[in-house]
Amino acid sequence: MMETIRELPRLRTLIAGWRREELRVAFVPTMGNLHAGHFSLLRLAREHADRVVASVFVNPTQFGPGEDFERYPRTPEADAAGLEAAGCDALWLPSVDTMYPFGPQATVQVSVPGVTSVLEGAHRPGHFDGVATVVARLFNQVQPDIAVFGRKDYQQLAVIRYLVRDLAFPIQLLAGATLREADGLAMSSRNQYLSAAERPVAAEIHRVLLQMRQETLAGGGRDAVEQAARARLTAAGFAVDYAVLRRPDLSEPADAGPGPRVALVAARLGRTRLIDNLAFGKGPSASG
Ligand code: PAF
């Protein structure tokens, strides 16, 4: 039976009890509106731990002005039912006051340097500060042994890795695979913003990522591959924020040369902003 917890003292008591029993605790942070992608992260957590905690918190500090904080889909009943069915032991549901006792404007900020200044960081100023700030708090609240994040948010995973290492959180990170719809569209809560006409077009992002991989592996230069990707997305009706090839650590590779790569796309279709990525090539991957 899953327990839903809204107060920090209760969460601490529950987890302290598990620790006394020497149970391993895994944690899956979410913003709710859960779909099959989230539930696959739950399953991964379950495989590596004795107890699983999931949080649902739509974090105001990671949304910029004019972004979709107000309209972000909130489906608390369905989330709780799905989590229970996926074998979650505890659902952590903090209020904004619990998360930010001095208010979201007066929070101690956690700001990760470097990797946060490019790509998503450049297009959504302050976004990763909000993510790092809330994730550091969630880690302090839950104090898990393991935390699970999806690979779909490739750069977020890099930010969390830096955070865990730099602040010495005793937490093992696990990365879950991106789940896709039948036509390749990466599962995301934001997909439901798409109109019926936009929905099939959205899958073009995945096809473009596959094309970027194919062209790169066939020896195509980075500039040409990126330009072709942007052109294809624009022709399909997207406003492209970026369509780039990077090394696994998100640094810019030289134009040619072997080695592991990740193709990353962020593009807007109507009012919906979508991101996706595809890692490929031989060698160590930074996404773990
Ligand atoms: O990936 C998300 O859903 C959010 O960015 C996270 C990690 C739960 C922090 O609010």
Image (cartoon, grey):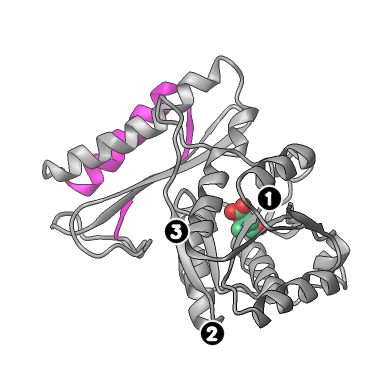
Crowding near the residue tagged with mark 2, few <14, some 14–19, many ≥20 C-alpha atoms within 10 Å:
few
Q: Which residue is identified by label 1?
A: 31
Q: Is residue 182 above or below residue 85?
A: above
> Does mark 3 have its CB less than 8 Å from ligand 1?
no
Percent across and percent down for residue 91 are 73, 56
Q: Which residue is identified by label 3?
A: 175
Crowding near the residue tagged with mark 1, few <14, some 14–19, many ≥20 C-alpha atoms within 10 Å:
some
> Does mark 1 have its CB less than 8 Å from ligand 1?
yes
Percent across and percent down for residue 43 are 52, 51
Q: Is residue 200 above or below residue 31?
A: above
| The quarter of the displayed image where residue 154 is located | bottom left
Q: Is residue 110 left or right of residue 91?
A: left
Residue at 68% across, 50% down: 31
Q: Which residue is identified by label 2?
A: 168
Asked whether the residues under the numbered discs 2 and 1 touch, taking CB atoms below 8 Å apart as contact, a structural biologist would say no
| Label 1 vs 3, first from the N-terminus | 1
Mark 2 → mark 1, Cα distance in angstroms: 25 Å
**In-front residue for pair 162/236:** 162
Asked whether the residues under the numbered discs 3 and 2 touch, taking CB atoms below 8 Å apart as contact, a structural biologist would say no
Q: Can residue 1 be seen here? A: yes
Q: Magenta span covers which residues? A: 220-247
